[in-house]
Image (cartoon, coloured by chain):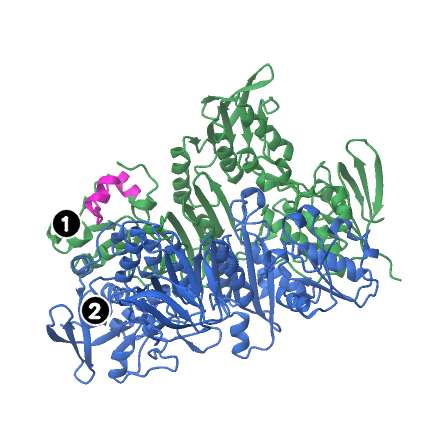
Chain colours: A green, B blue
Amino acid sequence: MEKRKKIIVVGGSAAGPKAAAKARRIDNDAEVIMFQKNAELSMASCGYPYYVGGYFDNRDMLLSTPAGITRDPVFYKNAKDIDARVNTEVTTVDRNRHVVLFKNTVTGKTGEETYDKLIIATGATPLMPPIPGIDLEGITTLQSLQDADFLRKIGDEGVIKKAVIIGGGLIGVETSEALQAADIEITIIELVPQLLAFLDWELARLVENHVRSKGANVITDNGVAAFLGENGKLTAVKLRNGTELPCELAVVAIGVRPNVRLARDMGLTIGETGGIEVDAYMQTSDPDIYAVGDCVESVNRITGKKVLAPYGDLANLQGRVAGENAVLGNCVTFPGTIQTGICKVFDYAAGSTGLSESTAKRLGYSDIVTVINASLDIPGFMGGKLLVTKLVADRNTGKILGAQCVGPGNVAKQIAQWSMSIQGNLSVENIINADLPYAPPYSLAIDHCIATAHVMQNKMKGRMDGVSSMEVHQKVINGEKSFLLDVREPNEYKQIRLGIGEMLIPIGALRGRLHELPQDRNTEIICFCQISLRGYEAAIVLKHNGWKNVKVMEGGVMAWPFPREK
Amino acid sequence: MEKRKKIIVVGGSAAGPKAAAKARRIDNDAEVIMFQKNAELSMASCGYPYYVGGYFDNRDMLLSTPAGITRDPVFYKNAKDIDARVNTEVTTVDRNRHVVLFKNTVTGKTGEETYDKLIIATGATPLMPPIPGIDLEGITTLQSLQDADFLRKIGDEGVIKKAVIIGGGLIGVETSEALQAADIEITIIELVPQLLAFLDWELARLVENHVRSKGANVITDNGVAAFLGENGKLTAVKLRNGTELPCELAVVAIGVRPNVRLARDMGLTIGETGGIEVDAYMQTSDPDIYAVGDCVESVNRITGKKVLAPYGDLANLQGRVAGENAVLGNCVTFPGTIQTGICKVFDYAAGSTGLSESTAKRLGYSDIVTVINASLDIPGFMGGKLLVTKLVADRNTGKILGAQCVGPGNVAKQIAQWSMSIQGNLSVENIINADLPYAPPYSLAIDHCIATAHVMQNKMKGRMDGVSSMEVHQKVINGEKSFLLDVREPNEYKQIRLGIGEMLIPIGALRGRLHELPQDRNTEIICFCQISLRGYEAAIVLKHNGWKNVKVMEGGVMAWPFPREK
């Protein structure tokens, strides 16, 4: 009889348990041991902000199967035949002897186990800024279940009144919402000039406007210089510009760093990104060792470049791949990521897949074309909500490189559609006549994503000369003499208007009021409406009547990220 | 100066206005005339059931732009420079003279207009069964705005107590929900053995169970023999089996027939499906005539076969294509349909894209593989709701041929994902590691669609021997001696159970209770759980312990469409 294969998994949070379970299912003979430093196993850590925010009260749900069984060592033994050892840190791996050395963090007891194949899933650790006062009481992250317990308790107690969130990324924004739900006054501090770095600035600004509208303060382009305290307790956050923000709580959410200490000590290759280097089999530089989850670097499928992509969904998928390869030999691959992500931001969602314009430009993609489109997600009579999408495509091939979407509408479906279309290598032309599920409760007759492709096509075919809200804003600031034409109805103008010197001529009246426009046919005229569909029609009318420099402000009033008159 | 091109559009409901508007935008010089037989233009007819059902009360929203402007001839003239003529029926087209003859249906006045290019968008008409009593008062369809007004009034008045819906398709089901919202007792009659023919039987049955749970009656496999009445008013519907259903209202929704009278009279080629034959340019057998919308036949992109696909979204997309080709000459194409559709059914949605198993088999696809997967759409702690998906793939290539999804969960996103993946020519393998937008408010860590691909992969690799609920049910009925093993927890079994002779052994106890199973290792054992993930794990354990004929019932208890003990 063949010797039982012995698989050791280091890490029991997300990728680790998935790898262990997959290995077990593929090879029921194998011995599978999983070491977990924490007391808990297989925590639904992406759910922490929602537990903190009171979306649900039963903490056990974070640690249980849908059937209500706690995912503890007994469960792993009985249901999965996996030897899960909690509170147990793997301290060293002796690759020559194929041995892991471990230590119980509670009892201090040490031991060792041999392995045939090792799977490393050591995760990532929140970055902490090396600044004065970092050790004061009242400063936390939202990474562990203990962090979640701490923050939930603060919310439940209702004593703390002011909190500062350091970092305006996904976790920072989710935590802001969670704490504000507990009536805590929130200020978000972000070092760069925008929240949510996966978005381009103008979409991020729409999100920021929404966050502010919900009563949270946002300070961008500023960092934390020090934490100030009294008697060991946090009393304020001091910013680089000298501002002091009184607060009793600070949550640090400036990103995570892959936990590669163990891998580095073992002599495994660490990539330039700081994550463990793995190939498509999730195999490290040691053929007997795989690595998965937040501790590894992944390949971006669009650029071919290595990236850190610490997403819970990818961790699970990578775990499956490594689990199967560890027991069968390399047979399945993980193709990499297109860095699809989404987060809830109060009543908005913000999502992205593929490349943003700023990322594409940073990586040297010069010949790209972008467009912004705004519309409802479903018809107005069904209670439709706004979506604003920015699409990035290759100018020559029309191939979709990325899409971002924000708003109160159904962002998740939009991003899902774009991510599938990128994975299917589709171009703008392919989306033009896409056959998507239409019924009024779920979509417009021409889905927002298809309409976005239509606008992009108009731009690529030279039928529409699009201009971004940022360019228009800059022109206004520079005092350029562009003529700004709002072609909405008076009732729309009365409710919301930009107030940047625009003239209002409803599209239905435009043909009869052309004499009111600058008669110099070379004057730059920028048309817009609520979402700039009528703006596009207006531009066609003007061009037809001889104006030579007519543009359309993409996304219209709905995608305008700057302050409005009304 | 070149002569102005003259474009005539016949039909002003959906595809027609889109074609006219596109032609206008592409060629601002052209003369565009649109003839509409009805009084209204560009009606949001897919919204009628929701107006009838009281989702909204402002009927004008069905006829207005998002800015609140009624889409009447004045709007078309002013905003679009389109000459829209309502109440005007095109009676004849003289192709030799390039002339359309029309008649005002109100005044009786006739006239003619020449055309350079003609676009036919004459739509479809509801089929009416040629049976006694069809002319009784109280029998209607839900096709026109007048129908919607009639049904809405009935709902508002609250006098009528019982209605029969003839036809269990999309419109029938939507109408049932709308009328039931007005406290009318509903019975749906369907000739074939299931509702919603785009679904395979077992998924349709889950929908039917839901419809019944909402208090509506459903009678399948039975047709209407006659409408019975007194004093010219409907009093009952008589079924083929003799049953008489007393009712004051009957809504006929047994399908639609393309309106091809005009096209046929003109001598245009009509396809075998009964729709006007068009090529990818939406051009008819006459190069100066295009046709779009419900009156044409389309190509199914998967099978290459002609089909009728009377969907509002396709009408719009086809209209754009014809509008552009009519003014520029043939330059853009419509690729056809994958017959993606979705409808709301009370608290469920039911959607489909590509081929169902029954359609695929009917068309001679012999080497296909199917799988059913059930799971929540988002985590339980976020209030996740059930989704049941049936995936159809080519057995050899793994190429996705179709997917159906039903349930209270986010069906639209699932179908959108599958439809994009079909349009991207993706295979099951490509979905295995898809990078989709994950966050707890929007998805499971492994999205339902990816999990479905995982189960399919397990099946295709021979790791899981799946059996459908229908096969299991048949075995039970036939008295076959299969051993049925439910591996859920006692609390789950207490709440819901099949009661088909199954034994309950929770997965966590299974390894210790193998002696309770039939010791003849050739006995067929069928494992299942709530969704059959644990069922799959149980099957692996049994196979490992020597049982040779172990199967997994796909979709588990959640996808069981038959009556349950509890």
The image shows residue B265 at horizontal and vertical percentages of 24, 83
**Dividing the image into 4 quarters, which one contains the N terminus of chain B?**
bottom left
Of residues A126 and A21, the one drawn nearer to the viewer in this rendering: A21
Q: Residue at x 48, y 76 (%)?
A: B303
Return the residue at label 2. Answer: B37
The numbered disc on residue A452 is: none
Of residues B452 and B110, the one drawn nearer to the viewer in this rendering: B110
Q: Relative to A223, say whether B299 is above or below.
A: below
Q: Residue at x 48, y 73 (%)?
A: B302
Q: Relative to B474, say whether A234 is above or below.
A: above
Q: Amino acid at mark 1?
A: Pro
Q: Quadrant of residue A217?
A: top left
Q: Amino acid at mark 2?
A: Lys
Horizontal placement of A102 versus A394: left or right? right
Of residues A222 and A441, the one drawn nearer to the viewer in this rendering: A441
Badge 1 element: loop
Return the residue at label 1. Answer: A518
Horizontal placement of A190 versus A546: left or right? right
Crowd class of label 1 (few under 14; some 14 to 19; many from 20; radius 10 Å) = some
Q: Which residues are magenta?
A: A473-495
